[in-house]
Amino acid sequence: MKIAVIYGGTRKSGNTEWLTKQVINGVKVKEFHLSNYQIDAIKDHRHSEGGFPLVDDDYQQLIQEIMTYETLIFATPIYWYSMSGMMKNFIDRWSQTLRDPEMKHFKKCMENKQAYVIAVGGDQPTIKGLPMIQQFQYIFDFMGMKFLGYILGEGNKPRDIEKDTKAISAAKEMNKVISQGNEA
Amino acid sequence: MKIAVIYGGTRKSGNTEWLTKQVINGVKVKEFHLSNYQIDAIKDHRHSEGGFPLVDDDYQQLIQEIMTYETLIFATPIYWYSMSGMMKNFIDRWSQTLRDPEMKHFKKCMENKQAYVIAVGGDQPTIKGLPMIQQFQYIFDFMGMKFLGYILGEGNKPRDIEKDTKAISAAKEMNKVISQGNEA
Amino acid sequence: MKIAVIYGGTRKSGNTEWLTKQVINGVKVKEFHLSNYQIDAIKDHRHSEGGFPLVDDDYQQLIQEIMTYETLIFATPIYWYSMSGMMKNFIDRWSQTLRDPEMKHFKKCMENKQAYVIAVGGDQPTIKGLPMIQQFQYIFDFMGMKFLGYILGEGNKPRDIEKDTKAISAAKEMNKVISQGNEA
Amino acid sequence: MKIAVIYGGTRKSGNTEWLTKQVINGVKVKEFHLSNYQIDAIKDHRHSEGGFPLVDDDYQQLIQEIMTYETLIFATPIYWYSMSGMMKNFIDRWSQTLRDPEMKHFKKCMENKQAYVIAVGGDQPTIKGLPMIQQFQYIFDFMGMKFLGYILGEGNKPRDIEKDTKAISAAKEMNKVISQGNEA
């Protein structure tokens, strides 16, 4: 089971990354920081003659690499009660890939994947983060991906998350599941 | 009551724009298409020494202009069960403005505003768009804005929305309310 | 298309009933007021030897009559951000019917039905009533029923609903749809 | 900190009760099984002359006893994506108590309480149970109660819950918090 972590935050070693590290502790994973890539917002050409034009950014290469992993961990800070705009742009672009004649295997490929979500926010994340979880469920349902679990942690200032014993305990539990058969 | 429409879509004359036009028919409004502006994703420097550095894009000028309106209509296509990444980036940047020493009046200014949401999507928007509505409520609550109403329309292909009689009827109703005292 | 209305309220001619009357105006329907029936809370015997014992109340007869209709309109006041306990008890009992050896046609029968929800509440129903709508969607999905639409109206004191022009407009729109081919 | 558990299920030693026992292990609590009480559905007389008539059931005595506790744990099986009808009826009746001239201290008294929710269901509870959690949040917000946490466990057949390691781990974590200063 090859595992990729997709980080949607921009602060190095932020709360979300710290919590995610508890989940992947001792596990072999590949980490992708979206902030290291240029990913443009989608321009909707689903109904244009000629379809989507080529976009000169890093998205295409990134999605192709991510497609080679079987388990995807979406790790995003909660900005304004949802995933970061950066991560949203990444997912929005899937609409383009779904219509890309050279990516006809995309949907099929994603259908075999399983997903986790790890998200940290400062304003009652275990309540106000729930609509975001429902959205991830709709996203994964649409793609046929299996949503295996999520953790909503609380943190605002740097290192706040280290005090969220509930989230840390859930991270350890998730670590056990992910570790099985995935030694680093 | 000065009214601004903030469009989060990229397709010219798309379904969301069409539905919004029913709402603002005969009403004097200023329309902002986010796709006409360069708005970078937020880089979280809330906790950096020195705070947020200047960002060389169009956000600052745009938010200042939008702040002069009293009613904000957020009009976004539903991408992946939420607002577009472009609109998300716009809102994410509010976190920066909230900490901008030269924008100390931002929060106070937004508190006096009222908001509407108009969104059109292709996959059961009146159900699967509800988490997005809840998020807008949380956003407006945080800013102290008054959430006066929303319309979720159905449309996938161009002009689909013209068949959604429920959404059109709701748009006409919203138009009546907005029109009062706002002749174009 | 035979239509049944199932009322979950207890106040005669309450706000929910008033709004529902706008929806069914001129349409031939059969109205069931749950308050006129004795419907006990479910006692969970799904896993008991011998299954569910007979319950001496009005539920069995009621569900059998309701099953003969093709369109079900669930009309409930919003109590504490959800359907009334009376309506919840009625739906909870479906779990019993699903296991009743003499009701083996229940699931199949319900699968062919379509449903509407009309609900009126006093505390921001168009926002705080949304989790209830999501639950109805889950319920209808489970049963294979088609969820055709809902209206969330605002009202607390008697006749408040008559001032909710948005809900009334939506009711008229729903009335048009329901009326087609259903003259009283 | 006096703790009361309010059980909404009817199956003795069911999954919800089992999970709750992990939470209250070693902690002094008083357990109330709603199934042991007769609690009628509310009859809405908020707007009747003379207000609510006396109801000849066990509710009044029960709510008065429960009011003497500082922490309330709502433990309910998830029936049809929400709390049981029995628990809903119990909460619906709070509307009556809020208007009871002899219970004028009710609101004030509840404001000082803190609440937990423990719920077990068979159909993707960590996703499809989320609207119920949002409703509990609205309920507690209305009453001014503090919502300290919740656990959503998975279980359908008896003893299923014993395999939900995530829920059990969360229960142990909650047990630690509750135990502090509450030895049995």
Image (cartoon, coloured by chain):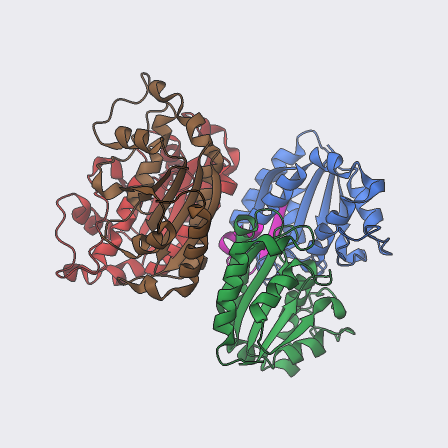
Chain colours: A blue, B green, C brown, D red
- Horizontal placement of C79 versus A81: left or right? left
- Asked if residue D148 shows in the view, the reply is no
Which residue sits at x=49%, y=28%?
D163
Residue A121 among magenta residues: yes
**Residue D67, percent across and down?**
24, 53
Return the residue nearer the eye: C138 or D2.
Answer: C138
Q: Which residue lies furthest to the top in this view?
A: C50
Question: Is residue D146 shown above or below A135?
Answer: below
All told, the count of numbered labels is 0
Which residue sits at x=85%, y=41%?
A102
Quadrant location of the N terminus of chain C in the rendered image: top left
- Horizontal placement of C75 versus B12: left or right? left
Q: In which quarter of the image is residue A115?
A: top right
- Horizontal placement of D141 versus B14: left or right? left
Quadrant location of the C terminus of chain C in the rendered image: top left
Question: Is residue A165 shown above or below D167?
Answer: below
Return the residue nearer the eye: C136 or B96.
Answer: C136
Question: Is residue D104 shown above or below A108?
Answer: below
Residue D176 among magenta residues: no
**Residue C149, percent across and down?**
47, 48
Question: Is residue D83 shown above or below B71?
Answer: above
Q: Quadrant of residue A85?
A: bottom right
Which residue sits at x=58%, y=71%?
B24
Return the residue nearer the eye: A128 or C90.
Answer: C90
Q: Give the range drawn in magenta.
A: A117-132
**Residue C127, percent across and down?**
45, 58
Return the residue nearer the eye: B23 or C102.
Answer: B23
**Residue B57, percent across and down?**
77, 73
Q: Quadrant of residue D146?
A: bottom left
- Asked if residue C177 shows in the view, the reply is yes
